[in-house]
């Protein structure tokens, strides 16, 4: 009776004692004290989370989540697992949210399956306000602690089916990436997603992932009962009737993959393309027309190229973690801990993600400028890496948006594509490169969002290149990074100074300095990968105009000395010669163009040296880290036949061929008429 009539004074005293006790517990957790004391803390917190007072339950769960972020072992917390699971059904939404945080943080390989199972059960009756966060956390736990690949697929598809509209794009796109990167999963995933599609009621998210997976891997189950090519087409066609336009666009891409995979149903597929070629939606109409044209070409060469198999995605920080930390930014004390347990707090990348509270991300495109994307228009996924995405600004960017945790617990470096390499050059790289081939200052790349300027200075075997990145947009861009790759030019040593900031405000500019050293002759230019977040993840791979002739200095010689050295060097391995014509009959080869091209390669043109006044001879010194190399040139143009004969000699092997190939490439283009 006395307890029931507890006075306000006693309540205040209890609240004050609890407040002091919570602060002491949080301090002890932060200090990482001895094991015995930590066990006592866990026991005390176990009583708090069962308290009748809502505030005490909330603070107990919060402290226990903090405990999970710091504790070496989760065993003391696991003792209270049933009570914590029960907190998901607490009458107070704040307590329910905190219980979800704690379950996420206390999960490990030993209890992942029961926790995920309980979260899935609760998802159906959970508040709408936390369903998206629950879906994200279930997806992360399923991926992170999956010991059985089939269990991962089962849970992921069940999650997508249950969560419906609460599934963010990152969740289903992540499933796409893992299936693509794990060959042993592909037949199982294709079969199970097809089973879901057969159901009368199927959410649009499952239709999108089904379209992608069947477009890539439907042939792996084509011999199974009930999964023939025509049956796959009929199921997808049924879903297409009620699907929104972005999903229909994705399924059209699936069907053009089917043309390549299942030629026996080509007539039915052509009918689909013909039908949608009259669609009032411009995106559907354009796709259908293009796919119809590709599918009806005399040969299948272009079809096979366009519908080539999807390459593996790169493995980096999980986009699910990025999405989660974006949603929870500012809701917890992230200066000292991250929701996700001790492993998450030990991971520098995850801690950094949690600190980036201003991170903005919208996955409307995929794959960073390589065309390797499971996305179609408006954030939908397409079934191929190299199908054209039409009518959308930036749809060729962002392959890295499907990045994440490795299911096998380690990254496969050999399978990771190097997006900074010359193999992934962006479509519009060449225009600026051509303009900067001889110039030392100008614009290397520009689009409505960003401008990349360049200013270079070369002295001897050294070059200093300053890159200027200007944000032309009306909003700031974040996570700005650059990566240089000189694997194609190993004899060019590159040293870069890191960017001072990772974000660029609207109208502002960032600078980066690149110092390069010509160690030995090199034939290819280095490349640079530029990526940043501006709504979506954007990426460009450009070739830098750093070539061998940049390290050449013109040199003067008299006619007598020129022919004397020419004979001394002689032919053989120290000479390279080529006879070639103009590539285009409409191109010109006037004398000014020829002389300007030779001078652009930094040759000193020696007049009145060759007996034929129409011929051009030149002399230069190539500066290398190991010393200087003398180079001589003789160019014999035939203006009537529009032909050249070019001969280069040097005192070191390989140099004549490198210089000749680059000059031939430029001269053969000719001058515009």
Image (spheres, rainbow, N blue to C red):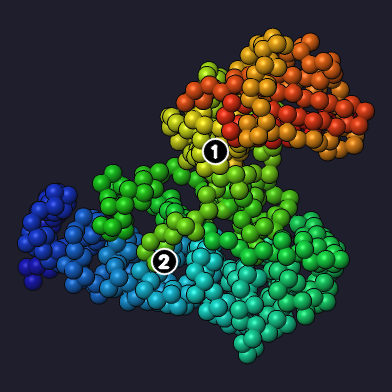
Q: Residue at x 6, y 68 (%)?
A: 2
Quarter that holds the C terminus: top right
- Indicate left or right for 116 with 529 as reference: left
Q: Residues within 10 Å of mark 1 (few under 14, many from 20)?
A: many
> Which residue carries the number 1 mark?
489
Please say whether residue 418 is visible from this viewpoint: yes
Q: Residue furthest right?
A: 640
When the figure is inspected, residue 456 is found, relative to residue 54, above or below; the finding is: above
Instruction: Give the x, y percent position of residue 271.
Output: 83, 73
Indicate the quadrant where residue 265 lies: bottom right
When the figure is inspected, residue 236 is found, relative to residue 414, above or below; the finding is: below
Looking at the rendered structure, the secondary structure element under dot 2 is loop
- Indicate left or right for 15 with 502 as reference: left
Please say whether residue 331 is visible from this viewpoint: no
Which of 127 and 427 lies nearest the eye of the viewer?
A: 427
> Which residue carries the number 2 mark?
407
């Amino acid at each position: 009776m006395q307890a029931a009539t507890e006075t306000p004074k006693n309540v205040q005293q209890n609240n004050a004692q609890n407040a002091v006790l919570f602060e002491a517990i949080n301090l002890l957790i932060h200090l990482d004290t001895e094991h015995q004391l930590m066990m006592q803390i866990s026991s005390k917190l176990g009583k708090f989370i069962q308290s009748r007072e809502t505030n005490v339950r909330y603070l107990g769960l919060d402290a226990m989540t903090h405990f999970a972020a710091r504790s070496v072992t989760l065993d003391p917390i696991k003792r209270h697992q049933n009570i914590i699971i029960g907190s998901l059904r607490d009458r107070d939404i704040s307590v329910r949210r905190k219980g979800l945080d704690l379950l996420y943080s206390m999960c490990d390989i030993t209890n992942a399956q029961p926790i995920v199972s309980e979260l899935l059960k609760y998802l159906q009756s959970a508040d709408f306000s936390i369903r998206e966060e629950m879906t994200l956390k279930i997806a992360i736990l399923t991926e992170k602690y999956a010991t059985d690949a089939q269990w991962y697929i089962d849970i992921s598809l069940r999650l997508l089916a249950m969560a419906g509209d609460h599934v963010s794009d990152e969740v289903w796109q992540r499933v796409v990436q893992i299936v693509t990167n794990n060959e042993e999963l592909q037949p199982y995933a294709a079969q199970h997603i097809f089973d879901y599609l057969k159901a009368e009621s199927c959410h649009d998210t499952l239709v999108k992932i089904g379209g992608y997976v069947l477009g890539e891997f439907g042939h792996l189950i084509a011999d199974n009962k009930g999964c023939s090519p025509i049956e796959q087409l009929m199921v997808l066609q049924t879903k297409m009737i009620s699907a929104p336009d972005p999903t229909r666009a994705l399924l059209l891409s699936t069907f053009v993959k089917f043309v390549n995979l299942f030629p026996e149903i080509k007539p039915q597929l052509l009918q689909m393309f013909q039908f949608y070629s009259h669609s009032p939606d411009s995106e559907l109409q354009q796709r259908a027309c293009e796919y119809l044209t590709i599918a009806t070409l005399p040969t299948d060469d272009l079809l096979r190229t366009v519908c080539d198999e999807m390459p593996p995605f790169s493995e980096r920080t999980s986009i699910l973690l990025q999405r989660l930390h974006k949603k929870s930014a500012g809701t917890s004390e992230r200066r000292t801990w991250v929701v996700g347990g001790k492993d998450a707090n030990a991971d520098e990348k995850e801690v950094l993600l949690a600190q980036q509270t201003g991170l903005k991300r919208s996955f409307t495109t995929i794959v960073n400028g390589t065309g390797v994307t499971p996305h179609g228009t408006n954030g939908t996924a397409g079934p191929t890496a190299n199908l054209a995405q039409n009518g959308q600004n930036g749809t060729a960017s962002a392959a890295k948006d499907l990045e994440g945790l490795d299911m096998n617990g380690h990254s496969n470096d050999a399978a990771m594509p190097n997006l900074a390499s010359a193999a992934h050059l962006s479509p519009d790289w060449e225009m600026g490169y051509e303009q900067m081939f001889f110039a030392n200052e100008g614009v290397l790349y520009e689009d409505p969002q960003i401008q990349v300027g360049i200013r270079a200075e070369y002295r001897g075997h050294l070059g200093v290149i300053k890159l200027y990145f200007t944000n032309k947009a009306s909003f700031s861009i974040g996570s700005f990074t650059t990566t240089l790759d000189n694997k194609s030019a190993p004899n060019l040593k590159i040293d870069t100074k890191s960017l001072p900031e990772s974000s660029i405000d609207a109208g502002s500019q960032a600078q980066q300095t690149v110092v390069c050293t010509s160690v030995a002759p090199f034939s290819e230019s280095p490349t640079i990968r530029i990526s940043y977040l501006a709504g979506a993840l954007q990426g460009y791979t450009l070739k830098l105009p750093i070539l061998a002739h940049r390290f050449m200095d013109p040199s003067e010689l008299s006619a007598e000395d020129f022919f004397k050295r020419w004979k001394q060097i002689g032919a053989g391995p120290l000479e390279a010669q080529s006879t070639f014509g103009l590539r285009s009959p409409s191109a010109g080869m006037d004398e000014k163009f020829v002389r300007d091209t030779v001078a652009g390669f930094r040759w000193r043109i020696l007049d009145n040296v060759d007996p034929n006044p129409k011929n051009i001879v030149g002399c230069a010194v190539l500066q290398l880290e190991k010393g200087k190399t003398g180079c001589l040139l003789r160019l014999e143009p035939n203006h009537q036949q529009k032909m050249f004969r070019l001969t280069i000699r040097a005192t070191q092997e390989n140099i004549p061929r490198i210089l000749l190939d680059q000059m031939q490439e430029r001269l053969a283009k000719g001058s515009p008429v």
